[in-house]
Amino acid sequence: MIKMFGLGVVLGMCLPVLAGYLFLALGGMPVTTTDAPLPFERYLAKKALKVTIDPASNHGDSSGPVGHKAPASGGRIHDCI
């Protein structure tokens, strides 16, 4: 029973490494811009963008006065001027 468990652990660690090596050695990695993207690459990129550009992070209207008086009015609000 312990020998089978140990064999399963060893195979579980070696097979993914072997699969990755064969993927690279047999030319599975795209290297030009015309090649298709890696599996899940488009999905993961979209997921990262959605987290970065989260609509919930909009904290309200940030529009304020526009023009040459805007920096001075901000300074007066914070007692800098």
Image: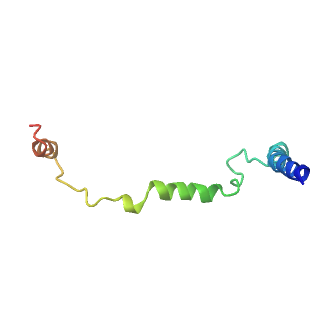
Q: Quadrant of the C terminus?
A: top left
Instruction: Write the residue at 60% across / 56% down.
Output: 44
**In the image, residue 80 lies at what x, y percent?**
11, 37
**View extreme (front): residue:** 1
Front-lying residue, 75 or 9: 9
**View extreme (top): residue:** 81
Q: In which quarter of the image is the N terminus?
A: bottom right
Front-lying residue, 37 or 78: 78
**In the image, residue 41 lies at what x, y percent?**
64, 55
**In the image, residue 78 lies at what x, y percent?**
13, 43
Give the total of numbered labels.
0
Instruction: Write the residue at 9% across / 43% down.
Output: 76
Instruction: Write the residue at 69% across / 51% down.
Output: 34
Horizontal side, residue 81 vs residue 64: left or right: left
Q: Answer above or below: position of 34 versus 78.
A: below
Instruction: Write the residue at 75% across / 47% down.
Output: 29
Front-lying residue, 1 or 13: 1
**In the image, residue 5 lies at what x, y percent?**
86, 52
Horizontal side, residue 33 vs residue 63: left or right: right
Colouring scheme, one of rainbow, by chain, secondary structure, one colour: rainbow
